[in-house]
Image (cartoon, helix red, strand yellow):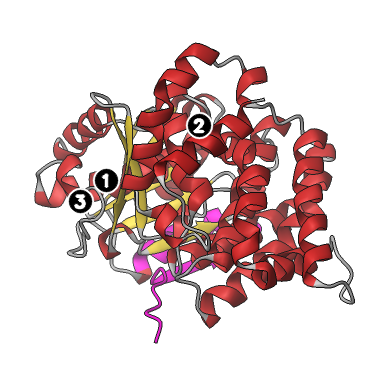
Amino acid sequence: MAAIFLPRAMRIGAGALKELPAALAQLGLGAPVILTDTFMAGNGALNALLSILSEAGIEARAYSNVIPDPTVASVDAAVAFVAEGQHDCVIGFGGGSPIDTAKAVAILAAHGGTMRERKAPHQENVPGLPIIAIPTTAGTGSEATRFTIITDGESDEKMLCAGLAYLPTLAIVDYELTLTKPARLTADTGIDALTHAIEAYVSKLANPFSDGMAIAAMRSIWPNLRRVCEDPGNRAAREAMMVGSLQAGIAFSNASVALVHGMSRPIGAHFHVAHGLSNAMLLPTVTAWSAPAALGRYADCAHAMGVAEASEGEQSAVARLIEALHAVNKDLSVPSPKSYGIDEARWTELLPVMAQQALASGSPGNNPRIPDAETIQSLYRQAWA
């Protein structure tokens, strides 16, 4: 038996943003607060959203100081802003950071307490304010997940917080919001979405429903990943990436992520590497180590992505998958931790800490091949250069 959780409503496709007032009305909501970042405030996207709401008679307040990789302190500042008004829902508008912030704020504004006391394995299931997710990147899938990631600035730990309370009530998935995104961001978020799909499929918690979403995501993402980086205005490719990202989010929210994500979060927390990029740094190495424990599953991924012929056996298909992951990193200029500029002495010093933080997240326990701390340190070393 699998328990499946989805947003209550989703509006998907070109121009879906204009449907936000009607979607809010359908849910009985009319006093939103918008949480976004300075980029969205500066490029006109926030004003466009406010205009759409205003034209429908909805006056929203907006907070635009969300930071990348939100911290406990940045979330608390947003909670204070929300407390100054009377709001019946929280809109996360932007990439993963504004949506993760909105999820945390929706709970703290309603129930108080701290995010530290809510980190995994705690499950937060009692809903707070309704969460409205409007992603502007094709990557995190956070618009359809029951997770948020908040960094503890005191310990440099990226805290995984889980539970039904973090599942958005409404997702507005409009690929036109991604048309102006730069190549680096497009590549990193795209590989993030691919990682979600692969890890959901090979996870020990995979089920027939999540499998269907994961396979569909891989079929959408892989053939369009290079295409959308080479031709940012390709609407069909942008749409495929956006839908694939959503499907991958649904897949891992109803299965899990695994070792790549467990190892990726400490890199982001300690070295401030963007989440999708740190996933990309690790994906080929971790896949090669994990594959012997689930050859059939990884071969299915290779076939879904079209990197292996249907007639090829499992060993050959998996070899092609690993080769393809290395190749796409090269083609999309994904740096290693070394070439990214991370100090080697600091990297080596933090390996034991990062390994313990990876294990503490719980994600490695869902990997088809379960590592210990020494193995995780070894994989970090392999990924270094």
Q: Count residues near mark 2 (Cα–Cα under 10 Å), then give few for <14, some for 14-19, many for 20+.
A: some
**Residue 147 at x, y = what percent?**
36, 54
Q: Count residues near mark 3 (Cα–Cα under 10 Å), then give few for <14, some for 14-19, many for 20+.
A: many
Quote the CA–CA distance across marks 3 and 1: 5 Å
Residue 40 disc label: 2
11 within the magenta span: yes
Q: Earlier in the sequence, mark 1 or mark 2?
A: 2
32 versus 50 height, above or below:
below
Q: Which residues are magenta?
A: 1-25
Asked whether the beta carbons under mark 3 and mark 1 sit within 8 Å of each other, the answer is: yes
155 versus 317 height, above or below:
above
- Please tell me which residue is depicted at 35% across the width and 30% down the height of the picture: 353
Asked whether the beta carbons under mark 3 and mark 2 sit within 8 Å of each other, the answer is: no
Secondary structure under tag 3 reads helix
- Please tell me which residue is depicted at 66% across the width and 27% down the height of the picture: 336
Residue furthest bottom in the image: 1
Per the image, the residue denoted by label 1 is: 104
Q: For the residue marked with disc 3, what is the amino acid? A: Ile
Q: Earlier in the sequence, mark 3 or mark 2?
A: 2
Quadrant where the N terminus is found in the figure: bottom left
Quote the CA–CA distance across marks 3 and 2: 24 Å
106 versus 219 height, above or below:
above
Secondary structure under tag 1 reads helix
